[in-house]
Amino acid sequence: MMDNVQARIEGVVAEFADLDGREKLELLVEYAAGLPPLPADYQAKKAAAEGRIHECQTPVFLWMTTNPDGAAALVAEVAPEAPTVKGFVAVLRGVVAGRPAEEAAHIPDDLVERIGLADVLGMLRARGLRAITTRIRRGFCG
Amino acid sequence: MPSYAQSDVLVSTDWVAQHGADPKVRIVESDEDRALYVQGHIPGAVEIDWQTDLQDPVQRDYIDRTAFERLCAERGISNDSTVVFYGDKSNWWACYAFWVFKLYGHHDCRIMNGGRKRWELDGRPWSTERVSSPHAVYTASEQDGSIRALRDEVLKHSRAGRPLLDVRSPEEYRGERMHMPDYPNEGAVRGGHIPGAHNVPWPMNCNDDGTFKSAKDLENLYLKELKLKRRSPLIAYCRIGERSSLTWFVLTYLLGFGNVRNYDGSWLEWGNCVRVPIAKGPEPGGITAAPATAEA
């Protein structure tokens, strides 16, 4: 099967599709646990408060970068007291990792709805995750 | 040393560790981040979510009496259960759920002082097991209007010059921002505060470990500095009613105030209403201009 951002999105949607609400949250918690720690060379940037997403209540730091070969990378740190955001960011990190930035610039803003989390989380929380998706997508635009 | 007015309403993590398995006791977690419960909860605790469990999915209101009875029955809560609430964020949502339980007349509600943070700091265990509850029977009362303020009542209260507490951040109060610092704007089109409201940000009630401040500190704040009386008719509000539930809890149960209501519509309603008065800046203000009212 072809590997691209679109196919990975479909994979994630399928992964969440048949789970009940509790199982969806358990999967999200698994994703959260798999988000790697912030690389050492980003610690100084974080200390300078670069990358801070001010819309988020708990500290969330995001960097949308492009490697010299044009591959997208999402570098992130999310506070452990926000596993929903942390897990969701980890999902997005996996979706874009290593793919061309122009593909990453097309992640769908409504991913949170597509994976069925909006009903589990309620409207206000889903809106926050939607905002994060938009932020990441824009970060990979040109 | 003064003590809390109703000290038995507040329980310690140690009390919960000792009584959590008592069939008469139900431990309930309510969080801002629902995945926290899934990641690890107090052994035996069930979850009640403020948004997906306590809000009516159609009308902007709480679930009705029948739905509340069903929720309690499913969670194994009966009328004589001791329900202990705890959660993240210094127990904001625990206090919110507590308030909804009081709205429907549940007798024995408690808060675990310090919530998730204190449990963690005390090095107590988290559980990931799925908690199944024995089905209970529950009969709720009609909503207790004496602890809930609706918009028109708030307008009358403000006009009458009665005390209001705005527990949001100073920036929100002054009208410089329409949401909590670092939170997304959840849809208020105007910023500022309800005329006459005093700004008493919710963190003034809490210590860094999530526990409540001592009775002495709370008395100094509310009785001495703000010169409120225990019989004062008070309305507290914030953005959607969760932080003001915490202030409502502190005033009612820890300080023994007799007439405090939570305005759960809060700024998300007021900041969107046509022709309700709004004050901006650091002063409480008051309604002095000719009333251009939203009232019939």
Image (cartoon, coloured by chain):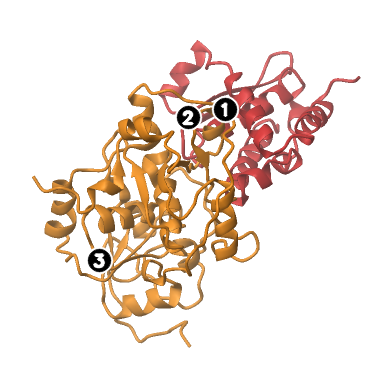
Q: Is residue B19 above or below residue B83?
A: above
Binning the other alpha carbons within 10 Å of mark 1 as few (below 14), some (14 to 19) or many (20 upward) gives some
Residue B278 rendering spot, x and y as whole percentages? 39, 71
**Left or right: A98, with B249 as reference point:** right
Q: Secondary structure at mark 2?
A: loop
Q: Quadrant of residue B182?
A: top left
Provide the residue designation for mark 2. Answer: B43
Q: Is residue A99 visible?
A: yes
Q: How far apart are labels 1 and 2 at the CA level?
A: 8 Å
Which residue, given by chain and number where applicable, does mark 3 sit on?
Answer: B258
Label 1 chain ID: B
Q: Is residue A64 visible?
A: no
Spot the red chain and give its letter: A
Residue at mark 3: chain: B
Q: Do the dots labelled 2 and 3 sit on one chain?
A: yes
Q: Are marks 1 and 2 in contact (CB under 8 Å)?
A: yes
Please give the name of the residue rendered at 83% of the width and 23% of the height, measured from the top-left corner. Answer: A4
